[in-house]
Image: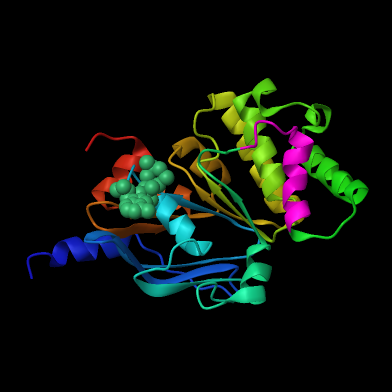
Amino acid sequence: MVDQPAAAEKAADIQTRTVEDPVVEAQDVSMAFGSNTLFRDVTFQVAKGEVFVILGGSGCGKSTLLKLMIGLYDPTAGRTKILGQDLHAASGDARRHLLARLGVMWQSGALFGSMTLLENVMLPLEEHTRLPREAREEVARVKLGLVGLSDAANRLPAEISGGMAKRAGIARAMALDPPVLFLDEPSAGLDPITSAGLDQLIKDLARDLGTTFVVVTHELQSILAIGDRCIMLDKQAKGMIAEGDPRELRDHATHPTVRAFFRREAM
Ligand SMILES: Nc1ncnc2c1ncn2[C@@H]1O[C@H](COP(=O)(O)OP(=O)(O)OP(=O)(O)O)[C@@H](O)[C@H]1O
Ligand SMILES: [Mg+2]
């Protein structure tokens, strides 16, 4: 009974929303590694063409949630779906087909250092298509063009800046024209101006191509700039403490941790 006020407070910042034909959905998802429960009952839906942001402090399970969504881990309870299909239940060709429709850029960004940017972007096309080399190269050039790297196609990762590497990572994640892109901390380690440029790129791609983005970040500026919607995970609460429009949460959140985050207040 003592924790009732806390529960009410928590619910106040969670504006649950359902959409028609969600691109990504999580239903009562819980995840634990052994006895270490990261989160329980995470539920949300992502609509087509929106930029959906997952935020929360270090170690609350953001990257793990992303990995669950793309089928790298199975949840301990609940389920996730992508494009209406349960990746965890799919096997063989159905699973491979579904995986080929997701683009992912990891926190580390990892490009292959011995390959040019063009070759890096061509890689998924080599793995998942039977396109001849000229066609693969053509597609890869188009993707590099989309992220503003046409002139750097023949450079090696060591010869470009951090911001360019992130762009190249996005180009590679987009090689197969995925309807949904997952980005883990795309602006980590970038200066504010480069980071703002990357935000603009994400917004442009969502608007112009209708690509759906699921982005993990804890950069407040970035969340307010690109997020159509967000959820906030919390390590102490072991679950979601907020869901909604980031600007509304900034102005109206009641949970102390959510307020502290959006208003940059000390707790
Ligand atoms: N494969 C794994 N096996 C066991 N524990 C793991 C595994 N992956 C992550 N963890 C633990 O789960 C917790 C959450 O990790 P996760 O990487 O999801 O956090 P995060 O929110 O992405 O943090 P950050 O903001 O630092 O990237 C951490 O305590 C981590 O040690
Ligand atoms: Mg992480």
Residue 258, percent from left and from top = 32, 48
For the N terminus, the image quarter is bottom left
Q: Is residue 74 above or below residue 262?
A: below
The answer to whether residue 235 shows anywhere in this view is yes
In percent of width and height, residue 211 lies at 69, 56
Quarter of the picture containing the C terminus is top left
Q: Quadrant of residue 168?
A: top right
Whether residue 112 appears in magenta in the rendering, the answer is yes
Which secondary structure class fits the magenta region best? helix
The reply to whether residue 244 is visible in this rendering is no
The furthest residue to the left:
2
Q: Nearer the viewer, residue 150 or 225?
A: 150
* Colour option used: rainbow
| Quadrant of residue 50 within the rendered picture | bottom right
Vertical relation: 154 (above or below) 119: above
Corner quadrant of residue 58: top left
Q: Horizontal and vertical percent for residue 181? A: 62, 54
Q: Which residues are magenta?
A: 111-127
Q: How many marks?
A: 0
Q: Position of residue 199 (x, y in %)?
A: 61, 39
Outermost residue on the front side: it is 114
**Foreground residue, 173 or 256?**
173
| Residue shown at 56% from the left, 48% from the top | 183
Q: Is residue 133 above or below residue 100?
A: above
| Residue for point 71% across, 50% down | 174
Residue at the (69%, 31%) spot, across then down: 114
